[in-house]
Image (tube, rainbow, N blue to C red):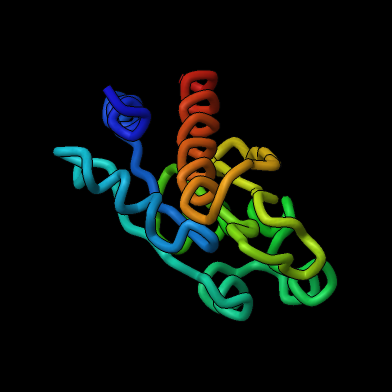
Amino acid sequence: MTAAAELLGDLRSRGWTVAVAESLTGGLLCATLVDVAGASASLRGGVVAYATDLKGALLGVDEVLLATHGPVDPEVARQMADGVRVRLGADVGLATTGVAGPGLQDGHRPGTVHVAVATPSGAHVRSLELPGDRAAVRTGAVHAVLALAREIIRRQG
């Protein structure tokens, strides 16, 4: 069973829903969840906020935070997860932000990734340095947020 299928099973067993906010993964996280048969029982939807201004406008990320630290920041990931959870009416929000490469972004090296999971009892962020090319970093970010979500949900269940 895949990590996405296990997460969706955990959510379904609790009667919970999930929504995703993506930047560097560009829809890959939502697609990974949708690939699981029966995903519609738990998946509310997703927002791909690739441009920095959309993180504020669509997800409620603090504009001052974005202006000061840029989009590649652990607090940005946390606010993205919180924002998508609230805006899409889900129990759980997942978020990905970072640099897939090939070059630096705002001084951050490729592979710099922040993933976040928000639940009614709080948000959790994991910061990573992932190896590989764009595809490997994006895939690694998806795996990382799914693993973090499973950890958090199982602890709360």
Answer left or right for 108 relative to 40: right
Q: From the viewer's perspective, tell me whether residue 16 is left or right of residue 153.
A: left
State the image coordinates of residue 2 (x, y, percent, origin top left): 31, 27
The residue lying furthest to the right in this view is: 68
Q: Residue at x 81, y 65 (%)?
A: 107
The relative height of residue 94 versus residue 152 in the rendered view (above or below) is below
| Left or right for 2, reference 22 | left
Q: Is residue 82 visible?
A: yes
Quarter of the figure that contains the C terminus? top left
Please state if 42 lies on the left or on the right of 117 as rendered: left
Tell me if residue 79 can be seen. Answer: no
Query: Is residue 8 positioned above or below 35 on the image?
Result: above
Residue extending furthest left?
37
Q: Which residue is at 46% across, 45% downward?
A: 139
Residue pictured at 35% horizontal, 53% vertical: 30
Residue 120 position in % (x across, y down): 54, 40
Residue 90 or 104: which is nearer the viewer? 104
Quarter that holds the N terminus: top left
